[in-house]
Amino acid sequence: MRRFLEATPPQAHDRALAVVAYHSLTRAPAVDEDARAALDVLEKAGLPPRALGHQDWPPADASVTEVVERLEQGARLDEAGDLGLLLATAARPTRADRNRLVRAVRGAGPSVGGRVLVAAGPSPLRDTMLTQLYAWAEGDPDHAPDPRSTAVLFVFATKETAVRARVGHRHLTRLDGVRSGLDADITRAVTALLADDGERAVDDGVLELWRERRRPASSLAAHSGPSWRDRFGRRKKG
């Protein structure tokens, strides 16, 4: 469709052609770069989708929409696995889909959001979500580091080690760098989020691991024990 439209003389880009093109594009299983390019060709010809009755372009991914709605309604911890598996069925969500999804995961609480990411499994969609969460967690000159994103990422990384150890430990290492740049207020905020997470299992060890890493240097030296990454990995094996 994209190549056809680009090869068609601009004067032929009339309403009839646009209707056929839009119907074809909106029935596609995923909105990819070619579909967006085809849309651009039509819009440059002065044929925007709204003028043709397509108010919801590009179409939302049904799986992402369901996950977002359930998270925003307060999904329980025992639903997290199913929601993650549902995300694994998503085709190629639009940017708007991805933005809504990552915000919903962030707002769902550390345990639910973290476990949704684990259950979703490695994919370009999950990579995009994690990239955004890390960006929020680290902050920038215009935005302070976000405790909610850090808490979700920490639960995700610790739980991921039980499923995909190498991936989980890679994220724990990355989070170690993130944590080193957090001030005391942000660190306390993350601790409070993990402690107040009502869905968190009492004995899951996540809060304990977070607190161990933040002990004063003198206490750490006195214990002279392994890092929290080693502690977590060894405890899971034992």
Image: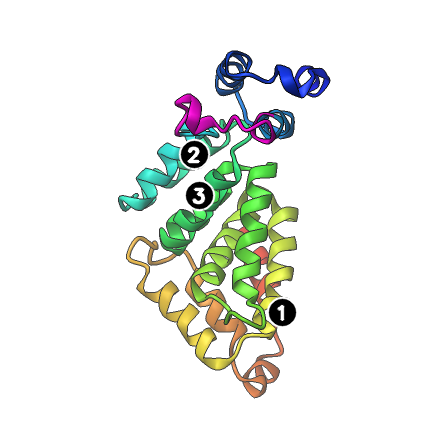
The residue furthest right is 7
Q: How far apart are marks 2 and 1 (CA)?
A: 40 Å
Task: Please tell me which residue lies in front, 190 or 169.
Answer: 190
Q: How far apart are marks 3 and 1 (CA)?
A: 36 Å
Q: Position of residue 7 (x, y in %)?
A: 73, 17
Position of residue 32 in the picture relative to residue 20 (left or right): right
Q: Mark 1 points at which residue?
A: 226
Find the magenta span and give its range: 42-55
* Residue at disc 2, secondary structure: helix
Q: Do the residues labelled 3 and 1 touch (CB within 8 Å)?
A: no
Q: Do the residues labelled 3 and 2 touch (CB within 8 Å)?
A: yes
- Is residue 140 shown above or below 22? below
The residue furthest front is 11
Q: Where is residue 173 in the image (x, y as percent from the top left)?
A: 64, 61
Q: Mark 3 points at which residue?
A: 101
Q: Residues within 10 Å of mark 3 (few under 14, many from 20)?
A: many
Of the image marks 3 and 1, the number of the one nearer the N terminus: 3
* Residue at disc 3, secondary structure: helix
Please state which amino acid type lies under the numbered disc 2.
Answer: Val
Q: Name the residue under label 2.
A: 64
Name the residue: 46% across, 29% down: 57
Please state which amino acid type lies under the numbered disc 3.
Answer: Leu
Position of residue 69 in the picture relative to residue 152 (left or right): left
Total marks shown come to 3
Q: Position of residue 58 (x, y in %)?
A: 48, 30
Name the residue: 47% across, 74% down: 187
Q: How crowded is mark 1: few (under 14 residues within 10 Å), some or many (20 or more)?
A: few
The residue furthest bottom is 218
